[in-house]
Amino acid sequence: MADVLVSHPHAANFACGVALALGRAGRLAAFFTGVAVRDEGWGGALARRLGKTRPVVMNRVMAGMPAGRLRALPHVELGSRLAANALNRLGVAIKPYDVIFAAHDETVARLPWPKETSLVYAYEDGALRTFERAARRGIARAWDLPLPHYLTIEALWKEELRRWPDAVAGATLFEPPRKRRRKDAELKLATKVVVASAFTGRSLEPLDLKVPVVVVPYAFPVDAFSLREHPPRGPFTVLAVGSHDLRKGTPYLLEAWRRAAIPDAELHLVGPLRLSSTFLARYAGTFHHWPHIPKSQLGARYAAADVLAFPTLGDGFGLVIQEAMCSGTPVITTACGGGPECITDGVDGWLTPPRDIDELVERLRFCAANRDAVFAAGRAARAKAERWTSIEFGTALLQALAS
């Protein structure tokens, strides 16, 4: 098995999970990331103090990270964010995401690496220079693809623009040529591709890759979300969490909710609503919207809902599926993401065909009429979650990287 260098620009949960799993197995050479601290020591103590007033700080605290393995680069992440904001104010249209990933990649490619490194594990958009250096040294390179391939997403957007021409709120939909070239070059340099869902893996099939593609579903965050003890009280409530746009299938959810016309029921949308005001006017008064909820409060939101709706048309995985299931809230989703990896249809959640409004209406009505059965499905969902924790994920990841 390789001693692995993991690189991710901003300590995303899934990247931290990879690093911690490798660290627990004694196979982590180093974890290069942005703002992050180990739970132990003065850094963790300071973060916990700040976290009392700014809970988001706790997202960057890594419990269980072996001493000497975390290589935090806060100056790169914070400096990149400031630089991107300054450029935007000067009229240069550039996404902070792109600046952060490119700067982190350049930095990691130039810093000293542990001499025992024999595999580099890096993420789409932040792997090019790091992989080039690894290739020169004969080091293996695992490319993590968190979302379906950009050609799949582009085709999805084109289809949805045809179906819902007035729903787009003016955002850029397709990757620019420079981003495409970067992604293509990273993939060409990879010696293995890691994805979290079979759906993402299938998005690579048209490319006829010559390197293996392995599927390792993310671990359920059972320690971060508690099982609710009682069924939700009050109106039948459907929750949707995340960005709400064409790719996430939000127009289908809104239309299905309107057609379902369930008495004494509420639809709650949490997260940015990226649909045009003209389109949303059709559904005025049919849903409640919160642009942002702190992650520390999400558990309570899941617990208060009968079901989570996630009718995505193209996701790399969909972490909200797992968060809801850990809370005991069953999920209605599609096979266009991590749903099949997490849900046994009709047992601990439901899988519906993408874009099928009639099926979604039927499922929503069923759940509203059978709240006790829905609560039981949620408890089965939590039981499923407890069978795929960070331990099982780590074992599967090690096997995938060693194969």
Image: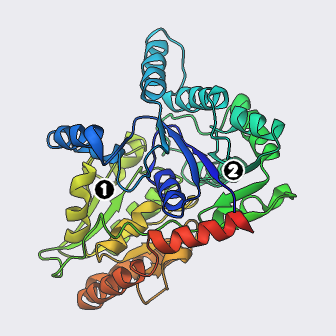
| Residue located at (55% from left, 75% from top) | 341
**Which x, y percent locates residue 96?**
49, 27
Above/below status of 356 relative to 104: below
User: At 12% across and 75% down in the image, what residue appears?
Assistant: 234
Name which residue lies at 70% across and 52% down: 142
Report which residue position mark 1 lands on: 269
- Tell me which label, 1 or 2, sits earlier in the chain: 2
Please give the label number shown on residue 143: 2
| Residue 372 horizontal/vertical position (percent) | 24, 90
To which quarter of the image does residue 400 belong?
bottom right
Give the amino acid type for the residue marked by disc 2 in the picture: Trp
**Residue 140 percent coordinates (x, y):** 77, 50
Q: Give above or below for 188 relative to 303.
A: above
Picture coordinates of residue 246, whole percent (x, y): 51, 52
Q: Which residue sits at x=26%, y=85%? A: 375
Q: Which SS class for mark 1?
A: strand
